Amino acid sequence: MSERSTALLEIPEPARRQAPARRALGLPAGLVRTARPRQWVKNVLVLAAPVAAGELVSWRTALHLALVFVLFTAAAAAVYLVNDARDAEADRAHPVKCRRPVAAGDVPVLVAYAAGGVLALAATTGAAVLCNPMTAALLAAYLLMQLAYCVRLKHVLVVDLAVVTTGFLMRAMIGGVALDIPLSRWFLITTGFGALFMVSAKRYSEAVQMAGRGGATRALLTEYTTGYLRFVWQLAAGVAVLGYCLWALESGNTANGSLLPWRQLSMIAFILAVLRYAVFADRGTAGAPEDVVLRDRALAVIGLVWLALYGMAVTDL
């Protein structure tokens, strides 16, 4: 009798009977886990352009943006599903990624590909029917770029940083595109370099944590130097702050009836937020940006103060 047969006989009969049922029940949960629910918070960026323009003032606008949020979340989930299906073999050899549902066998590779395809088609079709052609085009461009990243671009130095950064920028742009809101140059500069700051800080943290260990979590981490990644996030942080300050100084005054120069005051909170986040980047502990933002109380307070000041600035209170 083979070792496999012996092992199967050692499993109690009730457990053997329940295993297929558990797998069947676990498939929907596995698909949801593969879609990375914790990452959905990133898609709140679809509010960025309408909020910056002071257009988030009606239920109709809010409902429209909620729809855009759902469509972008579906598109991002499609990319995660395809990525995990493509990387299943490599993930099985990784000490942490082996727990991903596709790598662990909870979600078959073909099912992950099929679910990703359905979500991608539903997202682009929904954007074309329920929004406008430009929203559908932007969402389709995001999907094509991210799929190209999964297949090839994540292995190309510097281009991988640019692609991930552009993905965040597209999130921030799509709300404005869906509502036909013009996007200012300051908005694009600050958002784009702010995204590059967080992306490069994340890579830097991963490189620091993996220094001296075999098997980096990302293939390119062995080709980037920590010095280079530090240079990128410092450069990006500086340009993001400069762009924000130029916007605030260009428009910030009290001549329009505002009680105080809220735009100029918001610069203080924005700079403090960047400096606070840079502490974690410098320590090499910014590998999970969502954890840094949600768990650091000081950063959360600074963020709330900035939101209040920024809100008063765009509404001219």
Image (tube, helix red, strand yellow):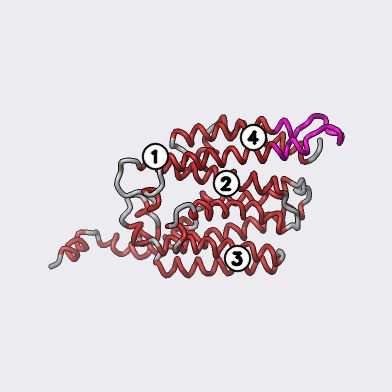
Residue 50 versus residue 193: which sits nearer the camera? 193
Identify the image quadrant of the N terminus: bottom left
Dot 4 or dot 1, earlier in sequence: 1
Q: Amino acid at mark 4?
A: Phe
Dot 3 or dot 4, earlier in sequence: 3
The residue segment tinted magenta is 246-266
Dot 4 or dot 2, earlier in sequence: 2
Q: Which residue is mark 4?
A: 270
Q: Is residue 28 visible?
A: no
Residue name at image x 63 percent, y 37 percent:
241
Residue name at image x 76 percent, y 52 percent:
59
Q: Indicate which label's residue lies in the foreground, 3 or 2.
A: 2
Asked if 221 appears above or below 125 in the picture, the reply is above
Does the magenta run of residues contain 179?
Answer: no
Q: Which residue is mark 1?
A: 208
Residue 76 point in image, percent of width and height: 54, 58
Residue name at image x 58 percent, y 35 percent:
274
Q: Which residue is mark 3?
A: 140
**Which disc number belongs to residue 195?**
2
The CA span between labels 1 and 2 is 20 Å
Dot 1 or dot 2, earlier in sequence: 2
